[in-house]
Image (spheres, rainbow, N blue to C red):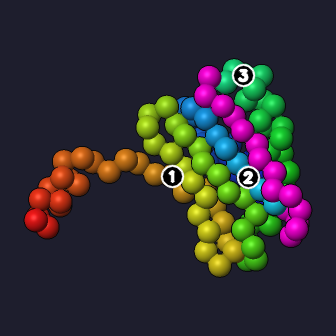
Amino acid sequence: MNAKQEFIEHVGTKEVQAVIVMYELSYGEPLKKIVLPKGFNKDNYNEFLEHLNFDYDDGFGGQELEGTIWYTDGTWSSRGEYDGSEWWEYHKRPDFSEEYRLMKAFR
């Protein structure tokens, strides 16, 4: 899997606010970190994508990528992993009224 292509496909049309990606492609290799800070410009974004342009094994085995993508609408994505298989997972903030209703039901 190419990390850059996976990132671009996952983000789609969502507006990115900031990103941190950490990876270790070989066991024992130092953990590497790629950061796209808040307030980035187009050049920063392109440089970030170039650093992310590498292939990794997204199948079974050890997890190779970790990280978080923050979006301007308050949602985020994090890395999911099961038995070595990995992917980006998109998260929305729970609806407050539903969470509040559930909290009151357990009092």
In the picture, the disc for residue 22 is 2
Point out the tag, 3 or 2, that comes first from the N-terminus: 2
**Position of residue 56 in the picture relative to residue 86 (left or right):** right
Is any part of residue 37 visible from this angle? Answer: yes
Residue 102, percent across and down? Answer: 17, 61
Q: Is residue 14 magenta?
A: no
- What residue sits right under mark 3 in the picture? 42
- What residue sits right under mark 1 in the picture? 90
C-alpha separation, residue under disc 3 versus residue under disc 2: 21 Å
Discs 2/1, front: 2
Q: Residues within 10 Å of mark 2 (few under 14, many from 20)?
A: some
Which quadrant of the figure contains the C terminus? bottom left
Amino acid on which disc 2 is placed: Met
C-alpha separation, residue under disc 3 versus residue under disc 1: 23 Å
First to last magenta residue range: 25-39
Q: Residues within 10 Å of mark 3 (few under 14, many from 20)?
A: few
Query: What element does badge 1 sit on?
Result: strand
User: Residue at horizontal 57%, vertical 54%?
Assistant: 78
In the picture, the disc for residue 80 is none
Query: What element does badge 3 sit on?
Result: helix
Report which quarter residue 105 is drawn in: bottom left
Residue 13, percent across and down? Answer: 56, 35
Which quadrant of the figure contains the N terminus? bottom right
Q: Is residue 37 magenta?
A: yes
Using the image, determine if residue 39 lies above or below residue 8.
above
User: Residue at horizontal 57%, vertical 32%?
Assistant: 17
**Position of residue 67 in the picture relative to residue 99 (left or right):** right
**Position of residue 57 in the picture relative to residue 66 (left or right):** right
